[in-house]
Image (cartoon, rainbow, N blue to C red):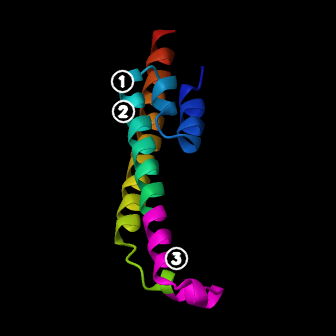
């Protein structure tokens, strides 16, 4: 028995979408990988905007770690939480799908022998 689900599961744990690609579900894997990359890019932009706003609120004369941290604490992090939640959802779906599809492939291969 080949144990396709083990390699797909381990790959999906590291990079969402890679497990689907290993299970020969290329379209699904590319979509999941693309979704993760888009969410990562949007998350970087959101974090940049939060950091920029925190530093711009601090006058250069008063720029010290305490005032910058106070400004960071006053920022709205809702967008980052939403992005993180969507990323986690895609990751969990990717892992479960890779595991179930790999297990199904192993079962079909075992029945075919």
Marks 1 and 2 close (CB-CB < 8 Å): yes
Q: Which residue is mark 1?
A: 27
User: Does 7 sit above or below residue 112?
Assistant: below
**Position of residue 88 measured from the top left corner of the image (x, y, whole percent):** 43, 55
| On-image quarter of the N terminus | top right
Q: Disc 3 to disc 1, how far (Cα)?
A: 42 Å
Tell me the tag on residue 31: 2
The magenta-colored residue range is 47-70
For this orientation, the residue located farthest to the front is 61
Q: Disc 1 to disc 2, how far (Cα)?
A: 6 Å
For this orientation, the residue located farthest to the right is 65
Q: How would you rate the neighbour count of disc 1 (Cα within 10 Å): few for under 14, some for 14-19, many for 20 or more? A: few
**Which badge, 3 or 2, comes first in the chain's sequence?**
2
Tell me the tag on residue 55: 3
**Position of residue 112 measured from the top left corner of the image (x, y, whole percent):** 46, 10
Horizontal arrangement in the rendering, residue 51 relative to residue 82 (left or right): right
Q: Disc 3 to disc 2, how far (Cα)?
A: 36 Å
Tell me the tag on residue 77: none
**Position of residue 102 measured from the top left corner of the image (x, y, whole percent):** 48, 29
Q: Is residue 24 magenta?
A: no
Total marks shown come to 3
Horizontal arrangement in the rendering, residue 68 relative to residue 86 (left or right): right
- Identify the residue shown where x is 47% and y is 77%: 56
Res 32 → quadrant? top left
User: Does 3 sit above or below residue 61?
Assistant: above
- Identify the residue shown where x is 50% and y is 70%: 51
């Amino acid at each position: 028995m080949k144990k396709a689900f083990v390699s797909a599961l381990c790959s999906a744990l590291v990079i969402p979408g890679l497990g689907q690609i290993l299970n020969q579900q290329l379209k699904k894997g590319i979509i999941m990988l693309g979704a993760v990359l888009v969410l990562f890019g949007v998350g970087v932009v959101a974090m940049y905007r939060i950091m920029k706003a925190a530093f711009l609120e601090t006058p250069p004369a008063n720029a010290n770690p305490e005032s910058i941290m106070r400004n960071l604490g006053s920022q709205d992090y809702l967008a980052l939480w939403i992005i993180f939640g969507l990323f986690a959802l895609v990751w969990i779906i990717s892992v479960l799908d890779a595991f179930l599809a790999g297990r199904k492939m192993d079962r079909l291969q075992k029945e075919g022998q």
